[in-house]
Image (cartoon, helix red, strand yellow):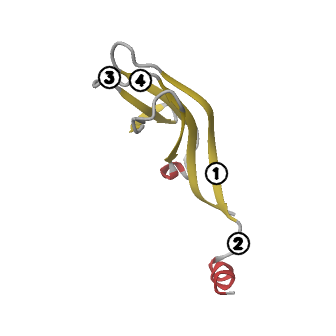
Amino acid sequence: TTVVAIILTFDQYELHIPEHCYHEVAIWIDDKFEYFIKVQKKRSLLTWNKEFIDVSEMIGKSHVRFGFYYEGQDADSWFLDNVSVGVFVDKSKNKQDRTRQESE
């Protein structure tokens, strides 16, 4: 089997979004900070929103950690729940088998 995609998912709930506000996912590999992925600000406040972030660049890496980072002011409130990492695999034996299955 070959890993073809890795998706980080979580539910987010926001009470207020001031102008200066950032919600981000930080990624560390082997205890070294790599980069931030900015989380879209949702304008549907006071409700849970599902977020999907493609982190497939992590395929083949070990010791990967995700952190949630907030920068803002005043009344911003950001809640997270149901955080998970989905790993999607290609279970076909080889490329010929995939091609044969798709054409049938």
The residue at 69%/87% (across/down) is: 104
Q: Earlier in the sequence, mark 3 or mark 2?
A: 3
Q: Amino acid at mark 1?
A: Val
- The CA distance from mark 4 to mark 2 is 41 Å
| Residue occupied by mark 1 | 87
Do the numbered discs 4 and 2 sit on residues whose CB atoms are within 8 Å? no
Q: Which mark is residue 92?
A: 2
Classify residue 82 as left or right of residue 19: right
Q: Residue furthest top?
A: 74
| Residue occupied by mark 4 | 70
Q: Tell me where residue 88 appears, x and y as whole percent.
A: 64, 56
Do the numbered discs 3 and 4 sit on residues whose CB atoms are within 8 Å? no
| Residue occupied by mark 3 | 18
Q: Nearer the viewer, mark 4 or mark 2?
A: 4
Q: Amino acid at mark 3?
A: Pro
The local crowd at label 3, few if under 14, some if 14 to 19, many if 20 or more residues have their Cα within 10 Å, is few
Q: Tell me where residue 76 appears, x and y as whole percent.
A: 40, 19
